[in-house]
Image (tube, helix red, strand yellow):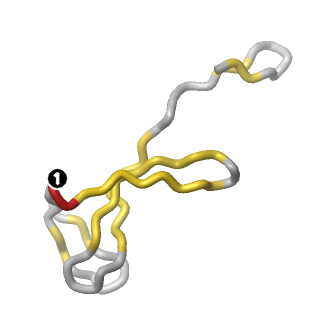
Amino acid sequence: MKIKCKVCKTRVVPQRESTVDVRKMLFSKPLYCDVMDCPKCGCQIALGIRETGVVHADEKGKVEE
């Protein structure tokens, strides 16, 4: 499956060797995703976002982890 770079529109086939795990802080909650560098322009292409887990809330709205 080819992925298209959003900057230079180059179509790239992702290789496992060229992907990196990245942790970003978004609204004080960590976001984990796999990224790779575009071979033409060098920008990062996000391949997929990883979910960290399931958060449950009780009847009163308190969050249980």
Q: Quadrant of residue 56?
A: top right
Q: Indicate whether 35 appears above or below 38.
A: above
Q: Quadrant of residue 4?
A: bottom left
Q: Position of residue 26 (x, y in %)?
A: 62, 55
Q: Indicate whether 32 appears above or below 57.
A: below
Quadrant, the N terminus: bottom left
Which residue is found at the position 20% from the left and 78% from the top?
A: 39
The front one of 65 and 9 is: 65
For mark 1, give the secondary structure.
Answer: helix
Q: How many marks?
A: 1
In the displayed orientation, state which residue is furthest to the right: 60
Q: Position of residue 13 (x, y in %)?
A: 14, 64
How busy is the neighbourhood of tag 1: few (under 14 within 10 Å), some, or many (20 plus)?
few
Q: Position of residue 24 (x, y in %)?
A: 53, 56
Please state if 64 lies on the left or on the right of 48 as rendered. right
Q: Position of residue 34 (x, y in %)?
A: 34, 53
Q: Indicate whether 29 appears above or below 45.
A: above
The front one of 50 and 9 is: 50
Q: Which residue is mark 1?
A: 16
Which residue is found at the position 25% from the left and 57% from the top?
A: 19
Please state if 54 lies on the left or on the right of 35 as rendered. right
Which residue is found at the position 42% from the left and 48% from the top?
A: 49
Residue type at numbered disc 1: Arg
Which residue is found at the position 51% from the left and 29% from the top?
A: 53
Please state if 45 lies on the left or on the right of 59 as rendered. left
Quadrant, the C terminus: top right
Q: Indicate whether 43 appears above or below 32.
A: below
